[in-house]
Image (spheres, rainbow, N blue to C red):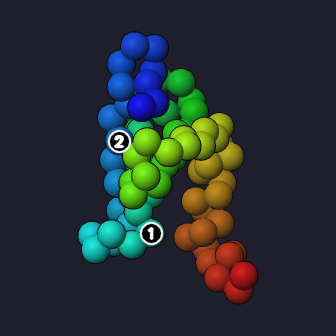
Amino acid sequence: MATTNSSPLRWVKSSYSTQNGGSCVEWAPAHVSATGVVPVRDSKDVGGPVLSFPAASFASFVAYVKAGEFDAL
């Protein structure tokens, strides 16, 4: 389990994830506030890898997704 210092991260499912188990992504917003790093994981594999991104880079990625920049891929 990923932790911040000695505390476990509090994961939140993305509002873009479906409630039926598809495309489930979780992130830990409190960790972002404290560190400027966005931890992301697959909610279907909570013991699996956690990817960490600088907050500014992740914000740019989200903006591109919202703008449909990756729709053609």
Q: Residue furthest right?
A: 73
Q: Position of residue 68 (x, y in %)?
A: 62, 78
Q: Is residue 6 above or below residue 48?
A: above
SS under mark 1? loop
Name the residue tied to disc 1. Answer: 23
Mark 2 vs mark 1: which is more N-terminal? 2
For this view, does 59 lie left or right of residue 28?
right
User: Viewer-proximal residue, 20 or 59?
Assistant: 20
Q: Position of residue 39 (x, y in %)?
A: 52, 39
Q: Position of residue 36 (x, y in %)?
A: 57, 30
Location of the C terminus (image quadrant): bottom right
Q: Residue furthest bottom?
A: 72
Q: Position of residue 9 (x, y in %)?
A: 38, 30
In the rendered image, is residue 31 in sight? no
| Rendered residue at 62%/49% (across/down) | 58
| Rendered residue at 66%/54% (across/down) | 60
Check disc 1 and give the amino acid type.
Ser
The answer to whether marks 2 and 1 mark residues whose Cβ atoms lie closer than 8 Å is: no
Name the residue tied to disc 2. Answer: 11
| Rendered residue at 35%/62% (across/down) | 15
Q: Is residue 55 above or below residue 9?
A: below
Location of the N terminus (image quadrant): top left
Q: Residues within 10 Å of mark 2 (few under 14, many from 20)?
A: some
Q: Residue furthest left?
A: 19
For this view, does 11 lie left or right of residue 5?
left
Say which quarter of the image contains residue 21.
bottom left
For this view, does 50 lie left or right of residue 8?
right
Check disc 2 and give the amino acid type.
Trp
